[in-house]
Image (cartoon, rainbow, N blue to C red):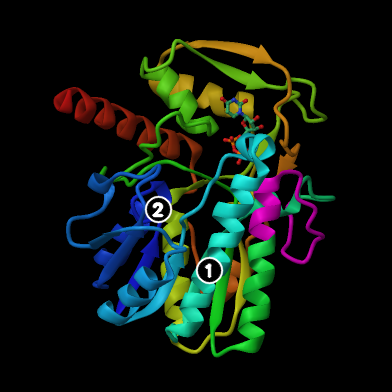
Amino acid sequence: MSVLVTGGAGYIGSHMVWELLDAGEEVVVLDRLSTGFDWAVAPEAKLVVGDIADQDLVESTIRDNGVDAIIHFAGSVVVPDSVADPLTYYENNTSKTRSLLESTVRAGVPHFIFSSTAAVYGTPQKVPVTEDMPTQPESPYGASKLMTEWMLRDTAAAHDFAYTALRYFNVCGADPRLRTGQSTRGATHLIKVACETATGKRDFMEVFGGDYPTPDGTCIRDYIHVTDLVRAHRLALARLRNGGGSLLANCGYGRGYSVREVIDTVKKVTGFDFDVRERERRPGDAVTVVADAAIARRELGWTPELDDLDLIVTHAIAWERHLKQLNSSQA
Ligand code: UDP
């Protein structure tokens, strides 16, 4: 029995692989290495380089490795890119997942865990947001993931198949043991950008929009440590294997920080007062998005252990320094 992790060479996927290996699972990674790295995949996992929409490859990988569960991370994740290039997002996130689901059903894999996103809510009418609140994505990224949730719902109703869709809030930080971290080139996510600036990879960073209706005028997000997030997936896997039915659950801490608060934390943790420039609003950004994760806590038995912004930034900075060393030793 083994677990297939799509996108396992990427940021969250590579943490998932370690989480599964630590729990004694056999792991197969399917990744086309478009944004991920082969060196990010734990050596104990098997890496298959290829596309999730290559049905022959997916189905032979499932059969050859006795896969009983798929954890699906492969996809595109940058909100403003999805606004500029929506069709690529619908292709990578929606069409290719449709193909993967077809392979999943055809090969008889009974369990599927999907990385969905808080972006399906757009700007919620109230926070913390619960799963039953209206979904009104404000970007093609959010819409592309919401359509996948609908495909999962309908597929589970028609076939012998159960899924867990986890709606991630803002994932950040790195493995506390620094076995992996966020290595994405040209990263755009706030904590990564701030840590790159604090460690000298960038000369300055930008704040997109200072006139939002929030206490300091910048957007508010719920930042969740990647290690807590992948733990929720492992609990979801155990639940599915125990016969648990399909489930939709938010993954966040239920506490929001503004862009300025995050930047101030990075400055405090590093002791470096880097250059921050004010810019216009960025297209597709929701104002305040904070999770109510009661369902994940109740149904998965999920108890976050790293719910501390200083700690998240400490791990993210440690990874940034580690990555710098790796890159300079490879150069
Ligand atoms: N943000 C920013 N500067 C950056 C990156 C992000 O001001 O260099 C802001 C962004 O406009 C949003 C928040 O930080 O309000 C979180 O953005 P991120 O891209 O990290 O995650 P998202 O919520 O879009 O998935």
6 shown above or below 106: above
Per the image, label 1 sits on a secondary structure element best described as: helix
Quadrant that contains the C terminus: top left
Instruction: Answer with the quarter of the image where residue 323 lies.
Output: top left
| 13 on left or right of 27 | right
Instruction: Answer with the quarter of the image where residue 278 lies.
Output: top right
113 shown above or below 197: below
Most prominent secondary structure in the magenta stretch? loop
Q: 172 or 83: nearer the eye?
A: 83
Task: Determine the CA span between mark 1 and mark 2.
Answer: 29 Å
Which residue position is annotated with label 2? Answer: 227
Marks 1, 2: nearer the viewer: 1
Amino acid bearing label 2: Thr
- The reply to whether discs 1 and 2 touch (Cβ–Cβ < 8 Å) is no
Whether residue 301 is visible to the viewer of this picture, yes or no, is no
How many discs mark residues in the rendered view? 2
Per the image, label 2 sits on a secondary structure element best described as: helix
The magenta stretch spans residue 75: no
Amino acid bearing label 1: Ser
Which residue is found at the position 50% from the left and 82% from the top?
105
Q: 112 or 51: nearer the eye?
A: 51
> Splitting the image into four quadrants, where does ligand 1 fall?
top right
Return the disc, 1 or 2, that comes first in the chain's sequence.
Answer: 1
What's the mark number on residue 99? 1
Name the spot of residue 189 as percent of width and height, x first.
Answer: 53, 34
- Badge 2 crowding class, 10 Å Cα cut-off, few under 14, some 14 to 19, many 20 or more, is many
The magenta stretch spans residue 144: yes
Which residue is found at the position 79% from the left and 27% from the top?
212
The magenta region covers 128-146
Name the spot of residue 272 as percent of width and height, x first.
Answer: 42, 13
Name the spot of residue 201 as percent of width and height, x first.
Answer: 37, 18
